Image (tube, rainbow, N blue to C red):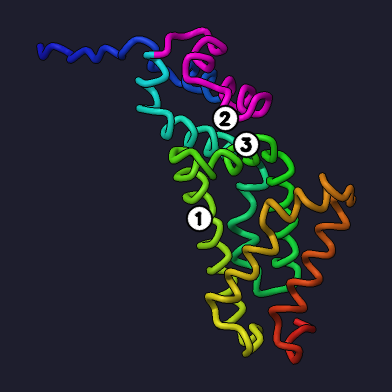
Amino acid sequence: MTAKRLTVAKPGLTPDTRTALLEAASRLIEGRGIADVTLADIASAAGVSRQTVYLHFGNRAGLLAAVARHLDFKSLAVREMPMAAWEAHSKAGFERFIRLWFEHVSAIFPVAHAIEAAAKGDADARAVWEERMDTLRRVIRMMVDGLAESGQLAQRWTRQEATDWFWSRTHMDVWSHLTVDRGWPAERVIERVIDSLWSDLINTDQKAI
């Protein structure tokens, strides 16, 4: 009879512990901002040792990236966005994507805003923020390519410039400035962004599609 090989898990390395750490980190970052939250604070809030944080995430940058992905994983909007992006060559698909994106932004805003603010002087936060913005730009570029290949992208745009314009108009800061600073209703922001972006990007001969 062949002896079974036993695998012994490292103490603290469980999915439940990982989730508890991510939830604790999200709460603390939302409440205090990244600069005032230490790994020791997060470990204490989750009821584990600081060493357990390192076992799960390696370092502070790994933890911040994991927090961002955890928020994405919890978001229904994020799960629906890829299909909307594939259908963005139609006005309905284009509108659906922007609605889903801003729905997600409104849900993650406190933590995302803290990461963005910290990115100005914190290398870990900057790496996480740049990774997320690069991912968003790649999705938008796919949408722009679909518009171009269906003959709908206005000729005045290069694909790269159209991608940058789309990204800038749907940036989290636009949402923040209008809904938080100026008190616009969320629906009005969404409608204005959809209408203005579609008008900006689309060949006038194709607007009825």
Amino acid at the residue labelled 3: Ala
| Residue 135 image label | 1
- Callout 1, which amino acid? Thr
Whether the residues at callouts 1 and 3 have beta carbons within 8 Å, the answer is no
Q: Relative to residue 167, is residue 9 drawn left or right?
A: left
Callouts 2 and 3 close, C-beta under 8 Å: yes
In front of the other: label 2 or label 1? Answer: 2
Going 52% across and 7% down the picture, which residue do you hit? 47
**Magenta part of the chain:** 23-50
Specify few, some or many for label 3: CA neighbours under 10 Å numbering under 14, 14-19, or 20 or more.
Answer: some
* Inter-mark Cα distance, 1 to 3: 19 Å
Residue 34 marker = 2
- Taking the magenta stretch, the answer to whether it contains residue 201 is no
Coordinates of residue 124 in the picture (x, y in percent): 44, 38
Which residue sits at x=48%, y=38%?
A: 122
Name the residue type under label 2: Ile
Judged from the image, the secondary structure of the residue bearing numbered disc 3 is helix
Q: Residue at x 60, y 75 (%)?
A: 162
Magenta span main SS: helix
